[in-house]
Amino acid sequence: MNYTDDFIDQLFSCVKTFIDPPSKEYREDRGHMKKNFTLQSIDRQFFFKGFVRFNIRFLENFSIGLDFDPKEVRGSICLLRCNGNHGENVVFPLHSSCHIHRATAYTINEGLKPESHIEQTTAYVSIDEAIQYYIKLINLDPAEGERHFPPKQLNLFSEND
């Protein structure tokens, strides 16, 4: 299949619901805490895998992603990763701040890492904010998003400070 940016936009804009929702608790895996889940478009035309993970020792190092599972080929295509700060390096200087990896038709069709287009973002600064941003960006049914990823309320006058 030859991908187009319009088709990728369609994958983002279709309303999604859970087939297999995330567990209530995270599970530990090699120094990270993870949740995985499976989504479908409401018309059942498209299927997706999603994930949330964060580093146990460096909470700013997180990734929330969406993979597309095309029916016609084996495997999946990473469409999106909303990432936190996980350290700058020479190749990816934006990794020292919150950033978004997105797939483009060009990267998919050329056999490159699909989500290699990177943009710095100020849309979120924490994993909780990034999850809420992700829910809107991927067009997850709002009721499902609220049920499985309820927004966290910050209490400025908490005794736990």
Image: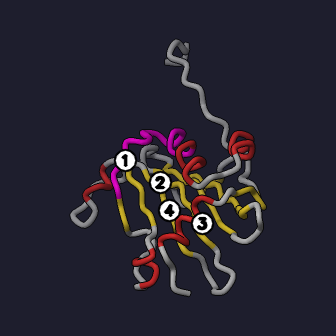
Q: Which residue is mark 1?
A: 121
* Left or right: 85 in relation to 42: left
Amino acid type shown at disc 1: Thr
Q: CA distance from mark 3 to mark 2?
A: 16 Å
Mark number for residue 80? 4
Q: CA distance from mark 1 to mark 2?
A: 9 Å
- Label 2 crowding class (10 Å Cα cut-off): few <14, some 14-19, many 20+? many
Q: Which residue is mark 2?
A: 82
Secondary element under disc 3, as helix, strand or loop, is: helix
- Label 1 crowding class (10 Å Cα cut-off): few <14, some 14-19, many 20+? some
Amino acid type shown at disc 2: Cys
Q: CA distance from mark 1 to mark 3?
A: 21 Å
Image quarter of residue 122: top left
Amino acid type shown at disc 3: Leu
Q: Residue at x 58, y 68 (%)?
A: 67
Q: How is the image coloured?
A: secondary structure
Q: CA distance from mark 2 to mark 4?
A: 7 Å
Q: Are marks 1 and 2 in contact (CB under 8 Å)?
A: yes
